[in-house]
Image (cartoon, coloured by chain):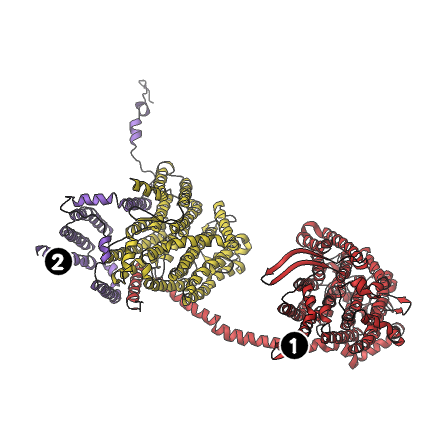
Amino acid sequence: MLSAIVFLPLLGALVAGFFGRLIGARMAEIVTTSLLGVAAVLSWMAFIRIGLNGGEPETIQVATWISSGLFEAGWTLRIDTLTVVMLVVVNTVSSLVHLYSIGYMAEDPHRPRFFAYLSLFTFAMLMLVTSDNFLQLFFGWEGVGLASYLLIGFWYQKPSANAAAIKAFVVNRVGDFGFALGIVGIFAVYGTISFDEVFAATPAMVGRTFEFAGTQFDVVTTLTFLLFIGAMGKSAQFGLHTWLPDAMEGPTPVSALIHAATMVTAGVFLVCRCSPMFEYAPDTLAFVTIIGAITAFFAATVGMFQNDIKRVIAYSTCSQLGYMFFAAGVSAYQAAMFHLFTHAFFKALLFLGAGSVIHAMHHEQDMRKMGGLYKLIPFTYAMMTIGTIALIGFGIPEIGGFAGFYSKDAILETAYAAGGVGSFGFVAGIVAALMTSFYSWRLAFMTFHGAPKWKHDAAHAHDDHAHVDAAHDEHHHHELHPHESPLTMTIPLAILALGAVAAGFVFYPYFIGDGNLETFWRGSIFVLHGEHVLHARHEVPEWVIWAPLTVTVLGFLIAAYYFLWYPKKAAALAAREGLLYNFLKNKWYIDELYNLIFVRPALWIGRKLWKLGDGWLIDGFGPDGVAARVKDLAGRAGRLQTGFIYHYAFAMLIGVAALLTWLMFGGAPK
Amino acid sequence: MLIAIAFYLFAAITIAAAVMVVASRNPVHSVLFLILAFFSAAGLFMLAGAEFLALILIVVYVGAVAVLFLFVVMMLDIDIAELRQGVLDYVPLGALIGIIMLIEISMALGVWAFAPEAGGAVASPWPDAVSKITNTEAIGHVLYSQFIYVFQASGLVLLVAMIGAIVLTLRDRPGVRRQSVAAQVGRRREDGVELKDVKPGQGL
Amino acid sequence: MDTLHADLLLTAPELLMAVGGMVVLMFGVFAAQKRPGIVNALAIVLFAATAFLIWRQPAGVLATAFAEAFVVNDFTRFAKLLVLLGAALSILISTRFFEREKIARFEFAPLMIFATLGMLMMISAGGLISLYVGLELQSLALYVLAAFNRDSVKATEAGLKYFVLGALSSCLLLYGSSLIYGFAGTVQFDGIQVVVDGGRNLGVLIGIVFILAGLAFKVSAVPFHMWTPDVYEGAPTPVTAFFAGAPKVAAIALLLRVLFDALPHAAADWRQIVTFISIASMALGAFAAIGQTNIKRLMAYSSIGNIGYALVGVAAGTEQGISSVLIFMAIYVVMTAGVFVCILAMRRVDGPTEKIEDLSGLMGSRPLLALCWIILLFSYVGLPPLPGFFGKYYVFGAAVEQGMWPLAVIGILTSVVAAYYYVRIVMLIINGAPPEKPFEPTMGGELRVVLGGTMLFSAAMIIVPGILVGWAGIAAAALIK
């Protein structure tokens, strides 16, 4: 049964991928979606059995994968609490996204390919979360990277989509390089890559060092640092985050599944999975906290002034991932996983809601061209509002609130209680929460409230996307009529909304309640100081507990002031293009900075190497020069063949004479 | 002594004739010199006591092969002047190679010696006075026993030569009438003769 | 009488071939004058029966017949089976071609049979006389086959050139044989071995040079290769296919027999000669092929180059070297058969074509055929994991093992040069503009069978190369005593 959870999506991918044309697009949709649905139901059953009811963790041996000398890597499914949490997240969101895509992608001619990719992604993600050793983890890691690349570039006719896909792939390579180095290092140090053996051996490794370039490095710190580099790439943490906003070029369901709920959280999962190692590397943990806090703050600042509806949510994702990381950095892995869990619901909800809006607007993504939609698409409006409230973590302490409230407040309080770098995380988190509230409401107000701004330039909007999909064009030249989405799209929204509302208070006791390490996680997460870390949040001062709610409401008021009550002022402020505004709108100029530091010098070096090194030096004297000589020789060799028989005979006799002479006088050995 | 004189005479004539085969301007002369070379070689065989080979050489090579050559050369109307054109260009190089090879082979001759084992390896029967076996008989003995394999193989070579000649030259010309003995013998009176009773005063 | 009985039993395959050849000839003359296809089929059956007899000969022993004029061991068995394979494939692909060219004659099959018989005798030769007779039997049949299309000026010219130069090479061989006989006093290989063992004998060495020159002519190694391009181009394509395959195997096998059975102790001397010939062949094969526009001419230079590679293994002079040569030749024979099938498939409605540029854009019109072309050409290049790579890998490996790495380096460099013209054809096939007059859309069933077999062989070489390598190893062990 547990194997079925992993392999049903693969089956769907194979069927849709290889027989998509044979069975038709409709059949491919039904097959993949229903297989995913079954997998999702099975995941929930596994979650209840192993997670909630305390069933035994299982390992299922699928096959011996690589066995070469000392190096052994089995293909084993490891199903413990950490895994079942991820299984539930992945399969639930994935099956809903499959269902949603049937409606969203209805006009696309390449649906079998799309669904095959989606299922393939799901399979790779499941491989990642069920892995029992680092190699299998890496396989899943690269598998989701590949699927992400394919899906970002799904509309391959669009140059921007191709560029975004390549950017995502390349930036991830940087992280993956660190990750791969970490795995190699683990094998070199431990002689094994199996999780159990590595984790068991870690306490003995503390304090061991190795020498590199004349400097001593702590083994565990270095290895965990390398692994975290990988996590940074995949989870778009500050520095390696640039690919995530661009990845929004992919279809919106893809953004919901891969770039919000599942793949980007793989880094968080990695850190939690490797908690037995990270716990023994306090320096790395501090680094994780700082990076997470910076990301949470940075992404929130940028998100405030974006105009593309999907980019706002993308930066929001980035920011939320920062929360998860700094939670993990202060050893509150349970809180990180809990936030991952709740975040999956409301972020998928927001993305799919945004997709519904985009669908209604016929692929218009600029919020400045929306407005006043709440009357036309009331259901989407309701769902988006639920998602927004969940995201900002609205809730009243001691009473209750939406999903985000439980997880985010737990993170902030734990960070404060941890002190040290945790305090930095707390401050950054509180500020980020203010901004989160602001940009979330700004999105809601710009999209659904105010005066409709889409009527007069609807035709223009169509031209922009005319090349994306010819099928869309047909009814695009006419007047725009925003309309509610079909049932296949609204049902997933409803289910996710349920999760966004209820996931917090239902699962709160299990994930981060008292005694969670013994009763719920049961060894899948390791905390050096036990429950104390998470428990400390109950002893923080009262103002810390109320601070998140305060800033959230403040953020709402600011957003309402500028975008609901006095929208002209916001426009005027934007038109002034102040220094800070431009700085934030241009994402801290990080893309430009990278361009200047890495891309352009790399291109310059590449061009020089190509023109001078390869073209002039190597080609000139190597292949080209040799080729020219070869041609000369070939001409001469060809001319030897005169066609006259006595020339031929002469050649033979000369040959004999030469051989004879060579043998007799050519220094033959005695 | 007399034998020695005869040997050198025959040897000198053989070499001179061989040179003339190549050097002669007229191809017919060349063939005639070839015949001379054959004859003197037969003389050498005779001196060595191989009378059977000597006579075979004359019968087969002079009697058949050389005469055939002569026919061919006379029928082909070769323009010798044209053939010789440009030969002089190659003389220096040809001479150089010839001289080099000559020197090298002479060096080999300088160390001529039968290897001691070689004596024993020579296993061919040699007619001697005691057994009174003639050359012809001796050849027959080894030809049909020890060398039966290569003898038969040589027969195959000749068969292939025959097939080759037929393949390359025999043509079925349409319209050529051939004698068919069987048809002639099998022909009956009824096939060729028909009696017609012609009434007087009437034509056929 | 018992000896004769044993001798006849040992030569049973050759006897069957000889008698069968005559029977086939008589059958052709009296019963199938107008139906050469039947005669060809009979010849293939005869080849199969002969191969079966050879297969059933006792393994792992050395046996001689007819006063050591005829030798059978695992090496000769391997080489003979390879020769029979090459010859049978050539007959198989010839029937339809000759019929369509209107030059089909029943004498073709008997000539092929006798030529193949000559090769079998060459391989089994135990002395210089049986060597010479076998060689002449083979050569004479090949001369006729080259000129088989007697109404074509090119073919007759090819046959004449081959004949005259072949006669010259026979003269060299005979001269060398007589020198060896003069100095060693014997024509048997083992007797010569005894003499050479006794010390370096200049007369014998000169004889060896002449014999090597004669054999080098048969394998078309530089500088005795001059006939090859003209004959390959002039002869009918199936005959060219035959020339490129079986006779090369036979001559290389004979060369190995002479070198290792008669002259193992003169290895230091002949190794120099073989090395020289090998380098010259590899270089010329690579460079001269570049300017060619006729595919058959190109294949001629390609075969010269390939023989150069095979000679690298010979020059190594070890058991490993011999087995590498056998592996190389086995792969070469099969690949060559495949390529010539592809060449035979170059046929338009108005007749066959031999121009390389007519392959342009084949990928578009005949993708499957184009794929076969590409696989075969890349195999010739020696691209792993295709069979051609294994062939080169083993011969170069054998040379390096003996410290002859300069030879291996030269081999690799010439392979790179040779890759140029192979890959150029591949580019033409893939990227070229489609021709105005396309090839006929289908090819004969027997061509497909042979091409399919070639591809199957390639796959087998990739999956289980050990089988061929194992056999070649056994065969090579039989030659080293």
Dot 2 falls on which chain?
Answer: B
Determine the residue located farthest toward the right in the rendered image: A399
| Residue C113 in view in this figure | yes
Q: Which mark is residue B168?
A: none
Q: Looking at the colours in the rendered structure, which chain would you say is drawn in red? A: A
Judged by depth in the image, the label closer to the viewer, 1 or 2, is 1
Report helix, strand or loop for mark 1: strand
Image disc number at residue A217: 1
Give the camera-side residue of A637 and A568: A637
Chain with purple colouring: B
Residue B153: percent from left, percent from top: 30, 45
Tell me the shade of chain C: yellow
Residue A361 seen in render: no
Is residue C181 placed above or below C416 in the rendered structure? above
- Residue type highlighted by circle 1: Phe
Residue B8's tag is: 2
The type of residue carrying mark 2 is Tyr
How dense is the environment of label 2, judged by Cα within 10 Å: few (below 14), some, or many (20 and up)? few
Which chain letter matches label 1?
A: A
